[in-house]
Image: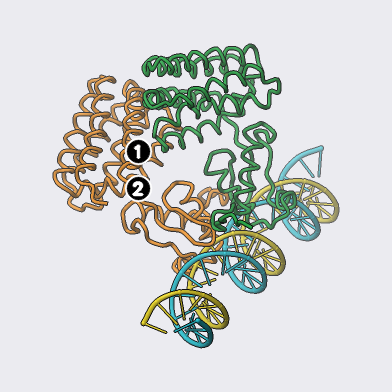
Chain colours: A green, B orange, C cyan, D yellow
Amino acid sequence: MKLQAYDISKTASAATIIFDALRHAIITGDLKQGEHLRQDELARIFNVSRIPVREALLKLEQHGLIRTQRYKGAVVAGLSLEEASEIFEFRAFLEPEVIRRAVPRMSRSLLDAAEANCAAFATASDPMDWGDLNRRFHTTLYQASGLPYHMEVLSKAMDRIDPYLRAQLLLSDGMERANREHLAIVEACKANDANRAADRTRQHILDARNSLVQHWKD
Amino acid sequence: MKLQAYDISKTASAATIIFDALRHAIITGDLKQGEHLRQDELARIFNVSRIPVREALLKLEQHGLIRTQRYKGAVVAGLSLEEASEIFEFRAFLEPEVIRRAVPRMSRSLLDAAEANCAAFATASDPMDWGDLNRRFHTTLYQASGLPYHMEVLSKAMDRIDPYLRAQLLLSDGMERANREHLAIVEACKANDANRAADRTRQHILDARNSLVQHWKD
DNA sequence: ATATTGCATATTGTATCCAATATTAAATCA
DNA sequence: TGATTTAATATTGGATACAATATGCAATAT
């Protein structure tokens, strides 16, 4: 009988498990802006004491996903139109640079994976998948950049605006347009045209921002 | 008798006080890369229980200033040359855009404050001040940008490379050159030339990165 | 009717304690 | 003498308990 090597110090702590669950609930919109996160209630839900719950809430606060006030508790953070818009601008500054760096280093299989993602996007019927697919599309392309710090920062920025992006994909022709633009980006990547991929990425992000601004109803 | 309004919910928790103290020790180099941060020892130093210490360490980890491993404890994070270089690149992508946005909105008093900072930089004899002054110079200029999210992200990036920047200011002609470049940036700002200010900012950051690379001895 | 005060309950911050795991030293074995 | 096993100690993760503060409601005062 063969035993799998197993590093206990690599296992996830209770706080990490709770953090992941709450972060996912926030970015998918299951936990909405303004909702209170009560420590005792969460401790009961996850069947733990308040200590790992507090640690999970602390991480969420550091990620900007919730706001806490001493002795008053935590609420799910929302973004104003200005704040959301600024994060799109941030992405529009940074993601073109990341993809510009990534394009020359993209392998055939990476490009295939990106195209497969577009195909999945086109056929996905469950809106819950759209946000994940959109996000995976971008990170798939960027991972060839060799810029892990940039990707980490962008991942946090995406966490902040994900609830809005996901809602926006449901509106108007968000999905169709997003996928057309995704395919255009992949086409530029396949042509090994870093500048064109960068331009299209930037335009795609600004288009998404403009669409969100038009439909804003906070 | 007049009483000052005082919002108890705005006071800093023990965890926040400990976090601030440890963060400062790390970015100024008082706590060095690789040093262990033991919960019990820190609890004794700050005269608290381990709980606020754990919470402070968690925040430091979220800021990338320390690394923790389950059951094994925390160590002060260092950066490889590649990682440090990437963060400079990140700044070089982002800070020009921030200052470009800030220049048209800079008030006379803000420009005066920036120049006063350069004067203080030129006369500061205590190397412990140089890092603070350098950092304050950049944030002074950027605050007119109206991009608080960008500034928050840049502040965290600066935290990561501060120990290296501060060390680098001590070497060679780091100080003199940094101040010359700071003055050149201010000059472009006073001329209301956003593009020139952006170009100079980018070059300044890349120069600092190149100087750091040359003197790297990790 | 409104303002103020007192009290109960809810919630959070932190202290203390226990269990789990890692590390180091001592004892034992080949 | 070196390898292995066992025991002791150090350290961390999480549970429980206590203190501090916020909130809401009832009682009282004006």
Q: Nearer the viewer, residue A90 or D19?
A: A90
Q: Quadrant of the N terminus of chain A?
A: bottom right
- Circles 2 and 1 in contact, beta carbons < 8 Å: yes
Q: Nearer the viewer, residue B58 or B148?
A: B58
| Point 64% across, 40% down: residue | A75
Chain to which the residue tagged by mark 2 belongs:
B
Residue B169 in the image: state x and y as whole percent.
21, 46
| Amino acid beneath label 2 | Leu
Residue A152 in the image: state x and y as whole percent.
46, 37
Q: Which mark is residue B108?
A: none
Which residue is labeled 1 in the image?
B87
Residue C15 in the image: state x and y as whole percent.
58, 69
Total numbered labels placed on residues in the image: 2
Q: Nearer the viewer, residue B57 or A217?
A: B57
Which residue is labeled 2 in the image?
B79
| Point 64% across, 47% down: residue | A18
Sequence-first disc among 2 and 1:
2
| Point 65% across, 12% down: residue | A172
Chain to which the residue tagged by mark 1 belongs:
B
Q: Nearer the viewer, residue A174 or B63?
A: A174
Figure check: B177 above or below A6 = above
| Amino acid beneath label 1 | Ile
Disc 2 with disc 1 on a shared chain:
yes
Disc 1 crowd rating (10 Å Cα; few below 14, some 14-19, many 20+) is: many
Residue A86 in the image: state x and y as whole percent.
48, 25
Disc 2 crowd rating (10 Å Cα; few below 14, some 14-19, many 20+) is: some
Callout 2 secondary element: loop
Q: Quadrant of the C terminus of chain A?
A: top right
Callout 1 secondary element: helix
Figure check: A147 above or below B31 = above
